[in-house]
Image (cartoon, rainbow, N blue to C red):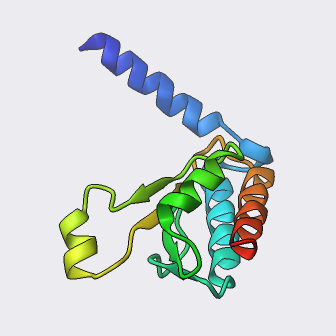
Amino acid sequence: NFAGIVGLNASIDWLKSYKPEGMPATTHQEKLAQFLFDELSHMPTLKLINSSPSPIVSFWSDKIDAHRLAIFLSTQNIMVRSGYFCCHYYLKNLKKYPPLVRVSMGLNNTQEQVEFFVKTLKTIIANT
């Protein structure tokens, strides 16, 4: 599969040279994950599933159903998932979690976007 090999090599070259916000891609993503984790950890009505920073964070709120929260975020052009994420039996029946919200960050996300997410989330929760 020569086309696949060439494509993979081009992807690796791009990833090595990609510098979001002027820093290496992994540093950028770690910085955003740390910021998001810190902000969400300080929101008393949120219960985080994550125990450490990650580009993917799952949580629930005591104040609003996960599905409603996802819809409200969607109206602000913030895309998240809600529910049990293909782990229905484990999350619902074994862990006894309510439906969750999951936010995922990629290399394309910026600090401003994560700040907007946090601000919007706080506003929604404060008004429910």
> Considering depth in this image, is 112 or 74 the residue closer to the camera?
74
Q: How many marks?
A: 0
Can you say whether 5 is above or below 110 in the image? above
Can you say whether 91 is above or below 67 in the image? below
Q: Residue at x 75, y 75 (%)?
A: 126
Q: Residue at x 62, y 47 (%)?
A: 74
| The C terminus - image quarter | bottom right
State the image quarter where residue 30 is shown.
Answer: bottom right
Can you say whether 55 is above or below 18 in the image? below
State the image quarter where residue 37 is shown.
Answer: bottom right
Q: Position of residue 62 (x, y in %)?
A: 54, 82
Q: Position of residue 50 (x, y in %)?
A: 47, 76
> Considering depth in this image, is 20 or 58 the residue closer to the camera?
58
> Considering depth in this image, is 16 or 117 the residue closer to the camera?
117
Q: Position of residue 67 (x, y in %)?
A: 48, 59
Can you say whether 8 is above or below 91 in the image? above
> Is residue 107 shown left or right of residue 82?
right
| The N terminus - image quarter | top left
Q: Residue at x 71, y 41 (%)?
A: 19
